[in-house]
Image (tube, grey):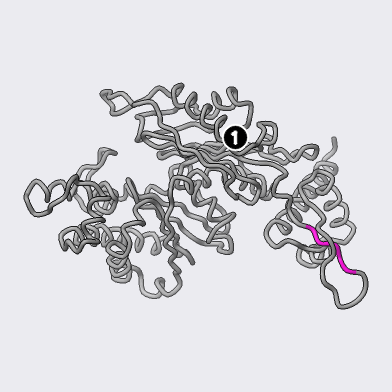
Amino acid sequence: MDDRRLDRDAIKRVNRNLVLNLVKSDGPLSRRDIVRRSGLSAATVSNLTAELIAEDLVHEMGPGETTRGRPPVLLRLNNRAGFVVGVKVMEERLAAVVTDLDAEVLAYRSDPLPTPRQTESGRSIDPAEVVAAIAETVEHVLSEAGVDRSAVLGLGVGLAGVVDSQTRRVVFSPFFAWRDVDLAGPLRRRLGMDVILENDVSALTIAEQWFGHGHNYDHFCVVTVGTGVGLGVVANGQFYRGAGGGAGELGHTTLVEGGPTCDCGKTGCLEMLASDRAVARQASRLVADGELELGTPTMAEVVAAARRGDEVAQGLLAESGRWLGVGIANVVNLFNPGLVVIGGEGVHAGEWRFAAMRKAFQEHVFDGLADQTEFVIEPAGDDTWARGAACVVLGEMFKSPLHKTRGFEVSASSGRVQA
């Protein structure tokens, strides 16, 4: 095949993706609308839409409004042309969803993981046990959604730690003391579907980029607070992973030299000052000293006490919020995002945490940058994290071929995502 044919094929893939994305994002649209918005010729749009209709990715939905002449036929994405599965792997359980092409959740399921064993390097679990648990959960959630495995475009798996999304290996997992573990390969062989592995915060960020608050922003960040503190960055419209997939470890930036020891082995990490775990640790100390009355020193108990008016509990949440504000100010100083989305289970602490966060942010952000930054605070339950993992697969489906990094394409014959 000569280079000219390759160039024509590449251009067609780019144009096809452009048309598909316009219909997905702005539809229903007429072919005339697509010509005007894309800059492509009417003949090119006619050929590409005919191909997408033949593949059942796009449907004609009837005539639109017009002031004169023949009403245009409107096109919309067939959101049931395929389905994806997303799984969030946590310390003790799995959360899984099945979504359509609009990322609408059709079924949700949560299952326990086998109990990790204590080893010299920390709590660990055999990767084969996790693979088996994920596979079983995927089978169950597909059954609950009424979706046949043959209609599944792919499986996205999100978990905490450093993930190399190119090799699809877990470089390091803080939950299970894993290093250089192949999780995607065994899952692909067991389930017969392609698997994308991604850091959980990265997956949530990709979901925001394609289907959430970040959709219309070229520069935005997602900060998660809960057991840890995480960061996802989109710059110039592209998700930023770093050289080896480890970008975004905001929780392990050092804020206090000689501060509390973190699970990562370092001291003074933001995570040990601002996370839910940090609040629980401080609460445990205050309970032992008789300064705070709680049934158990957990984040949930601290929040409940704060709502009852306990000033010590309120102070703990405010202190964690203050450190979080310092960390976010550093993020804004570095990346100057137009939007910061704050999510995670720690959002449920409410204004006891976030009033102090906003105050500290204003005190530490560089002059002028605060006015350019919009904040959205959005709770993220287990289903939201799992949906984020599913959106990693959807993101690859709708991503321009110019920016694809994982070798995924949408098959012209079936609409399936292929590696």
Relative placement, left or right, of 307 versus 66 is: left
Where is 33 relative to 130, above or below?
Answer: below
Image position of 227 (left or right of 336): left
Indicate the quadrant containing the C terminus: top left, top right, bottom left or bottom right: top right
The verdict on residue 72 being magenta is yes
Residue 122, compared with residue 309, is above or below; it is above
Q: Amino acid at mark 1?
A: Leu
Q: From which residue to which does the magenta span run?
A: 71-75
Where on the picture, by quarter, is residue 82? top right
Position of residue 335 relative to residue 240, above or below, is below
Quarter of the view holding residue 44: bottom right
**Image position of 51 (left or right of 295):** right
Q: Nearer the viewer, residue 234 or 280?
A: 280
Residue lying at 61% horizontally and 48% vertically, measured from the top left: 395
* Percent of width and height locating residue 313: 19, 58
Q: Residue at x 63, y 30 (%)?
A: 193
> Which quadrant: the N terminus?
top right
Classify mark 1: residues with Cα within 10 Å, few (<14), some (14-19) or many (20+). Answer: many
Magenta-colored stretch includes residue 205: no
Farthest residue to the right: give it: 69
Please tell me whether mark 1 sits on a helix, a strand or a loop.
helix
Answer above or below: position of 35 versus 296: below
User: Residue 340 appears at what percent x and percent y?
Assistant: 44, 62
Query: Which residue carries the number 1 mark?
Result: 142
Percent x, y for residue 25?
67, 59
The kind of secondary structure the magenta stretch mainly shows is strand
Outermost residue to the bottom: 67
Percent across and percent down for residue 117 are 31, 23
